[in-house]
Amino acid sequence: MRISLMADIHANRRALDACLAHAQAQGANRFVFLGDYVGYGPEPQEVLERIMGAVARGAIAVAGNHDQAVAETRESMTSDAETAMAWTRGQLGPGEREFLGSLPMRFEDETRLYVHASPQTYPAWIYVNDGPAAKRALEASRAQTVFCGHTHLPALHGITATGQLVSFQPVPSVSVPLPRHRRWLTVVGAVGQSRDGDPSAAYAILDTDRSEITHFRVPYDVEATALAILRAGLPPSLANRLQKGR
């Protein structure tokens, strides 16, 4: 089975469409969405239509902090994020709101755990942004492999039976074996708002038969999405960040 793993879409329809098409061309036969479908970007309705359609066809989706913030107005965010979230609430109908409110915080699939942030605690949204954070996240779960987003930065961490940590910076399109004598945590990167200096969309595919994971970067029309952000009246800094990939 080839499982497509996508996180942090952030209302970026063009990036999502590009990744979906790429994953299908790579032979993905299952789709998992790791949260933050809204916020920052200009197309929350279009993105949710695609996610809801995929879930209706058997895809898995978990909640992210921006998804939760649609209903929770007291969610603490940066000024630009709160501005985008207030705008997003006005764009969504009851069906989209109900869908976001129904999403689980985590989903266990055989030996795999799908979450948006660290599985340590909720409702706190803990970033897995380095090796020690990855080790704490793995220690908080019994899953063989944990998949998350939230940081917008692709990463791969493993821990041996003796507790030794190994960390990798994924190289796009290069498969990495996941030996079963280790436990693994993968941060899949961001589809809709990259923050590693590369504006292209990021996602990963897990091959369960080969026990390996491959991270991908997918180009899309960043300039068109940045223009849509400005036309929607969202903060210009969000368009600039998209263009810079930071």
Image (cartoon, grey):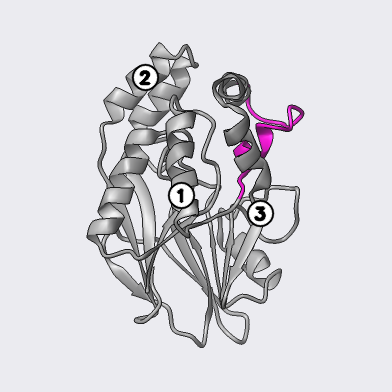
Query: Where residue 105 sits: x, y (%)?
Result: 67, 54
Q: Residues within 10 Å of mark 1 (few under 14, many from 20)?
A: many
In front: mark 2 or mark 1?
A: 2
Quadrant containing the C terminus in the rendered view: top left
Amino acid type at mark 1: Leu
Q: Is residue 109 left or right of residue 212?
A: right
Give the residue at x 54% y 22%.
91
Mark identifier at residue 200: none
Give the residue at x 48% y 85%.
180
- The numbered mark, 2 or 3, whose residue comes first in the sequence reads 3
Query: Where residue 107 sits: x, y (%)?
Result: 61, 63
Amino acid type at mark 3: Pro
- The numbered mark, 1 or 3, whose residue comes first in the sequence reads 3
Q: Quadrant of residue 69?
A: top right
In front: mark 2 or mark 3?
A: 3
Location of mark 1 (residue): 153
Location of residue 157 with respect to 201 vertically, above or below: below
Location of mark 2 (residue): 228
Q: Which residues are magenta?
A: 63-79
Q: Quadrant of residue 209?
A: bottom left
**Outermost residue, left side:** 25
Amino acid type at mark 2: Ala
Give the residue at x 46% y 24%.
238
Give the residue at x 44% y 84%.
179
- Residue 65 lies within the magenta run: yes
Location of mark 3 (residue): 104
Q: Main secondary structure of the magenta part?
A: loop
